[in-house]
Amino acid sequence: MRNNRIHVEKHSICDQLNSHFINVGNDLAEKLPKHNIDPSKYINRSMTNSFMFRGICPTEVYDEIMSLKVDKAAIDIPRKCIKLAANDVYEALTVVFNQSLLQGIFPENCRVSKVTPIHKGGKEMDPFNYHPISTLSALTQFF
């Protein structure tokens, strides 16, 4: 049941779950008390040069590829394929990652995730009885 309506068709249930997970953050944010406090007042020191991004070297990329867990899900290239091709792709991936940092461009396919609602128990029609699991690109861990 959602918005005083019982949804029994799979398409309608999916739409309601999707709507719930898309809007839950905004709905909760709207319930927070409104304060006009400048968040910078909590910063006690200058943040100038507090951190920096550095390029990565090919051995770091190779090590990351080899540490991939092949039993974890991915939405594009299977992790096992990436590991099997490590010797052939790690140098090219290093260039892609470093260019991404230099240009400030995050690859589109790494911004996408597949969200699967997992039933926590209770009534299946209640969208609050589900929690989302996100499946990302296997290459996302390098960015």
Image (spheres, helix red, strand yellow):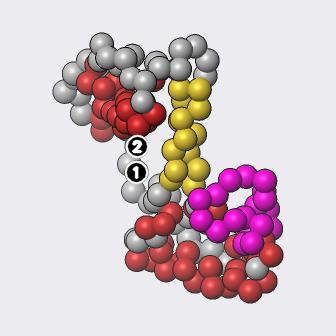
Kind of residue sitting beneath label 1 = Met
Find residue 47 and name its label.
Answer: 1
Q: Position of residue 87 (x, y in %)?
A: 78, 83
Q: Considering depth in this image, is 60 or 140 the residue closer to the camera?
A: 140
Name which quarter of the figure residue 116 lies in: top right
Q: Secondary structure at mark 1?
A: loop
Q: Position of residue 64 (x, y in %)?
A: 73, 66
Give the left or right position of residue 129, taking residue 45 as reference. Answer: right
Mark whose residue sits in front, 1 or 2: 1
Q: Considering depth in this image, is 86 or 13 the residue closer to the camera?
A: 13
Q: Secondary structure at mark 2?
A: loop
Find residue 45 and name its label.
Answer: 2
Q: If the image is split into quadrants, where does the C terminus sit?
A: bottom right
Asked if the stretch drawn in magenta spans residue 74, the answer is yes
Q: Note whether 59 is above or below 71 in the view shown.
A: below
Q: Which residues are magenta?
A: 65-82
